[in-house]
Amino acid sequence: MKRILIVMLGVGICAGALADSGSPQLKLESQRLIREAGHECNKVEGVYPSAFGGSLIVICDDSHRYTIKNKDGRYVVGVAE
């Protein structure tokens, strides 16, 4: 699980222009992290690399946007603006 997110964070900036909505496994892991952080996410619509900062943007339920960042080996979930 951690390897998948680390790879996405590492390659995300370079592959930003070619990004699709994310693999099914990446969506499941992102949803799990978001829920563990106490946020609502019934369905992941897409997982995209952020243009800046080496993070992922996750869109849930067509209305919620979250960021997932790797900070010292721990994943931090925040609400995207």
Image (spheres, helix red, strand yellow):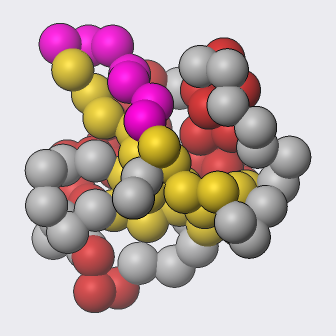
From the top left corner, tell me how far across and down residue 39 is, in percent: 67, 31
Q: Is residue 23 visible?
A: no
Residue 15 versus residue 45: which sits nearer the camera? 45
Dominant secondary structure (helix, strand or loop) of the stretch shown in magenta = strand
Q: Is residue 3 visible?
A: yes
Look at the picture and state if 75 lies above or below 65: above
Q: Quadrant of the C terminus?
A: bottom left
Q: Could you tell whether 78 is left or right of 35 in the image?
A: left
Which picture quadrant has residue 48?
A: bottom left
Look at the picture and state if 16 lies above or below 29: below
**Residue at position x 25%, y 74% in the image:** 15
From the top left corner, tell me how far across and down residue 58 is, in percent: 53, 55
The answer to whether residue 74 is magenta is: yes
**Residue at position x 22%, y 57% in the image:** 11
Residue 55 versus residue 78: which sits nearer the camera? 78
**Residue at position x 67%, y 20% in the image:** 38
From the top left corner, tell me how far across and down residue 77 is, in percent: 45, 31
| Furthest residue toward right | 42
Residue 79 versus residue 59: which sits nearer the camera? 79
From the top left corner, tell me how far across and down residue 36 is, in percent: 66, 17
**Residue at position x 26%, y 13% in the image:** 73
| Furthest residue toward front | 81
Span colored in magenta: 72-78
Q: Could you tell whether 6 is left or right of 39 in the image?
A: left
| Furthest residue toward bottom | 17
The answer to whether residue 42 is magenta is: no
Look at the picture and state if 75 lies above or below 64: above
